[in-house]
Amino acid sequence: MGNTFLTPGHDNIACLLSNDGRYTVSALRTLIDSRQNVTVTPNQVNWLRSVPSKILCFVWRAAMGRIPTAVALRKRGMTDIITSCSACIDGEEDSDHILANCNFSREVINLILQWCGLNNKVFLKVEDILAHAHAFGNSKNMNKRMTVICYGLLWGLWHHRNARLFKNAFTHPYFVAESIKVNVYFWLNHRGKGSVGDWEN
């Protein structure tokens, strides 16, 4: 305290992450991304207000393969973990497998694509799903809706995977797809700027 000198005037606090001294979330995110081994391009994750923050954070982490899957936990030193997928028991449970490449996930994805009036597609990685959402549609509104649907899809698959592991609740892909539709509808209708209409439409 002996080296502290008080001077008259106003205090001034500046953020060192940006040139103008103002703190922004995007500046912090750029710093975090620059220190990761896996880079995520800004176009891969769209931070929409329609989607709850915890789901946006989950999608961002899933895109980098940073969610706590069995393979990730094994790499972190938890040796007593079974790494086979709890749905298909046919592959290693990493983020790409359980969210895109598992037979269970593929069935749910195809049900959601059919709901959107689209043909079935095969996605091998989370990155492929995000790229599909990013490139979809001829208008900003169509692109936004497909992005929200894809984020809801990823979150729904993760949520039901956790229910399978921790509650022994194995849900049929049809009901997983139905719960994703409900979430997406409520996000768009109640968190978005405008109503998307009634449930039937």
Image (cartoon, rainbow, N blue to C red):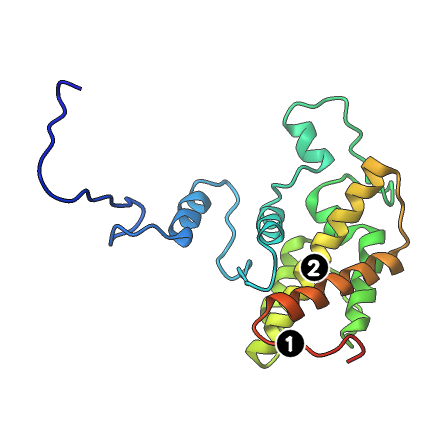
Q: In percent of the image, x 77 and y 22: which residue is there?
A: 80
Q: In percent of the image, x 80 and y 59: which residue is there?
A: 179
Give the label on residue 118, or none. Answer: none
The alpha-carbon separation of the residues under discs 2 and 1 comes to 18 Å
Amino acid marked by disc 1 = Ser
Q: Establish if 108 lies above or below 171.
A: below
Quadrant showing the N terminus: top left
Element type at marker 2? Answer: helix
Amino acid marked by disc 2 = Gly
Most distant residue in the front direction:
8
Please name the residue that numbered disc 1 is placed on: 195
Most distant residue in the left direction:
8
Q: Establish if 10 lies above or below 2.
A: below
Res 92 → quadrant: top right
Q: Establish if 153 lies above or below 135.
A: above
Please name the residue that numbered disc 2 is placed on: 152
Residue 101 in the image, given as x and y percentages of width and height: 77, 52
